[in-house]
Amino acid sequence: MDFLDFFYIRSREARHALEQARARLYRVAYAWCHNAALADDLVQETLTKALRKSAQLRDPKARDAWLFTILANCYRDHFRKTREMDDIDEIEISHETTPESESSRTEIVGLVRATIARLPQGQRQVVTLVDLEGFSYVEVSQILEVPIGTVMSRLCRARNAMKAMLLPAMQQNPDMNRVIRRIK
Amino acid sequence: MSQDKRFSDEFLNAFVDNQLAAEEKSQAFVEIGQDEALNRQVCELRKLHDLVQLAYSEPPAAPARAVGLNSRQARLRFGVAASVLLTLGIVLGSQIRMPATTPSVTAVPAAEIQQVARIASPTKPIQPKAAALADVADRVASQQTATAIPAAETTAVPVPVIARDAIPDNTTTKVLIHLARDDADQLSQALDDIESTLKHYRETRQSAHVEVVVNGKGLELVRIDTSAFAGRIQRLQREYDNLTFAACQNTIDRLAREQGIVVRLLPGVITIDSGMAEIMRRQNQGWTYLQV
């Protein structure tokens, strides 16, 4: 049934670009929800929508921001369905669901993920879009549909919180710093 | 302006994220380089940035996705498959209905005349007059036509066998098209419509017959000396054996009587006693009537 895809995507290039974007979308989606299955679902839904609406994308240079906008909408919709009354910015993921236990790689990775998972959702989205994808503040404000001032303040609060949580832990454990130095 | 205010946390973050204008950035570089505390802050922010990248450089693999369970895609594909099957069913169904299995139960004399005409036809094509005679033999109001057809006799061109009365009874679609005007545009349009209709029936493998009845000024379409579409009509007749052109004998007679015109019809065009009578007969037989 591949011929159906032909109708959705006019050019091979666009299709190729979408396939390339999958890994990046998944990485950010995972950083947002810390749930591999949910992240995969979100990416799948994002790509499905992107395929369907590919005609709407006029400027290929804006493809990345466009894709992440769709991802942000899918993520928001998902939480609309599952949480009814909570303010999305105020939600803190509880310790039980942190990926600390799930991570079998290094302690530092688990610690950073746990820290990010504990950030309020809005802050988590901003910090991951900026740090993982390198989006500019303007692009992040468009993707998340919030004013640029909000982007900056969320980023600032997120990093302050991460600093407060991460750096003392790393100072207590000199091994972690060694890991980081080696990577750098 | 105090240093604290100029280098707010937001400013430092923007500096680390390369979001400052070039001028602002170069100025900040100088000032941050001179201030150890600011330098340390910037280092910490960069470290955080790197930590985030490290933490998600290899996210856990997504669980295996069950193929075909994506609800929207599955629904869409199911829908397409269903419509393809439906179309296939309709086409097959119409094909199954097509073969002629029911014997004719219409008037015997007409069938006999047909047979005679067919036997005679392979070696010697019948003339329009003969066809007209065969045609009207079983009809009530045929005497006048059968006896006086001077115009048709003048048609020197041999006419191929006309399947006029050989229309199978199980023909599902029977269309009678009535042309009574000589407007070239209208006639051209009518021929377009006729051709596309026949083409459609052929493509959909439907059993159909189209009869074009010309009378009045419409007769000009099928006269050798006046027809603007002679070639096209002949081509259509060659291509479609389920197409008949029938000229009204009353009109032919009137032209001869009133204007002294000896009508010569295009090859393959048959004559009928009366256009109007034919229309009524065909309608009684369940034909679809279309007037151009």
Image: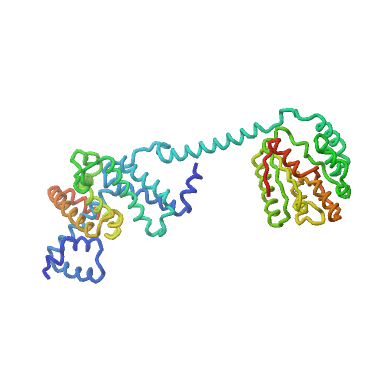
Q: Residue at x 30, y 58 (%)?
A: A139
Q: Residue at x 50, y 41 (%)?
A: A1
Q: Could you say which quadrant of the image residue B161 lies in? A: top right
- Is B169 drawn above or below residue B176 in the view shown? above
Looking at the picture, tell me which residue is in the foreground, B36 or A96: A96
Query: In the current view of this chain or complex, which residue is farthest to the front?
Result: B258
- Is B96 drawn above or below residue A77 in the view shown? above
Looking at the picture, tell me which residue is in the foreground, A25 or B172: B172
Q: Give x and y (percent) for residue B97.
A: 65, 31
Q: Give x and y (percent) for residue A73.
A: 31, 49
Tag count in the figure? 0
Left or right of A61, for residue A179: left
- Is A49 drawn above or below residue B74 in the view shown? below
Q: Give x and y (percent) for residue A30.
A: 29, 45
Q: How is the image coloured?
A: rainbow
Looking at the picture, tell me which residue is in the foreground, A70 or B223: B223
